[in-house]
Image (cartoon, rainbow, N blue to C red):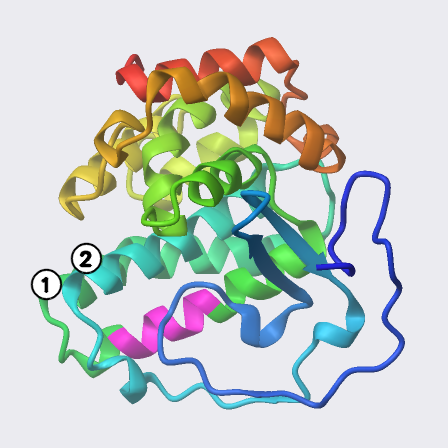
Amino acid sequence: WDYVKYPEGPRLIPYLSRPVICVPTTAGTGSEVNRFSVITNEVRKEKLVLSHSLNYPKAAFIDPSLCLTMSPKLTAITGFDALIHALESLTNRVENFMAEEYAVRAVELIARWLPVAVEDPQNLKAREKMSYAAMLAGVAIDHMGVALIHSMEHPVSAHYPHVAHAVGLAALSPYITKFNCKGNPQKYSLFARLMGYEEKPHKAVDALTDLIEHLNLPRTLKELGVEREMLTRLTEDVYMLSRHSLPINPVEPSIEDIGELYTRAYEGNL
């Protein structure tokens, strides 16, 4: 915990790590190819990112057949995580042409193959495409980072540990995407097109809500068991613990914006 990235920086700087070889059995995080890990302090109810070059695995072996035993529900959850990685790296304010191409390809693959993998878990081709997409999205966030959707989800699953990370992303992402569209309409239009929708920024919201419904994922924070009286604490946690990520969001939010987005996501007020 001493190594996590608080807004003022980590308390300790690592200088050595044990070599790690990654063999993913899901297709979602992309952690086999990037420098990020996430740690939850259950006592403090804080969930923070540990980002360092020493986090890079020494090797990664990606065998899609290892994903064949995932349930449809877990397939949907992990696949949606990969999609939001691609979406946030594609649309945030960080410019990196190479990583953008990775994100674009990841969105294309997920749009085509995630529903197939959920409906036909033994489809090895679908598992292969999703493993590839998760890896591409993992590389994309390594170069471009994530933004407000992740920053607002982490306090949710920190305070409500029964909530899987990507389930929280699903409950938040349409509301935040609608807020963000005006900050980068060109890239949100591109995302909509890649998802098979009309090339207009607001169609990115439709793409997400339709997929969430198709995957049977929750659409509000209330469905997750979040209490209304906790929304203020969640808002404060974002501003206290994730301030460093807010400037790269397509629209830099105020603390009032974050509070309103939590309220909308709680009420289902899109």
Q: Which mark is residue 94?
A: none
Q: Position of residue 253 (x, y in %)?
A: 64, 18
Residue contact at pointers 2 and 1, CB within 8 angstroms:
yes
Determine if residue 201 is in view. no
Of residues 47 and 178, which is closer to you in this image? 47
Residue shown at 61%/30% (left/top)? 238
Measure how far apart labels 2 and 1 are at the Cα level. Answer: 6 Å
Q: Quadrant of residue 14?
A: bottom right
Q: How many marks?
A: 2
Q: Which residue is mark 1?
A: 119
Q: Which residue is mark 2?
A: 115
Q: Position of residue 71 (x, y in %)?
A: 17, 69
Q: Is residue 207 above or below residue 232?
A: below
Residue shown at 85%/47% (left/top)? 9
Secondary structure found at label 2: helix
- Is 16 contained in the magenta span? no
Q: Quadrant of the C terminus?
A: top left
Residue shown at 89%/76% (left/top)? 15
Which three-letter amino acid code belongs to the residue tagged 1?
Glu
Q: Quadrant of residue 55?
A: bottom right
- Is 132 contained in the magenta span? yes
Q: Which residues are magenta?
A: 127-134
Q: Residue furthest left?
A: 119
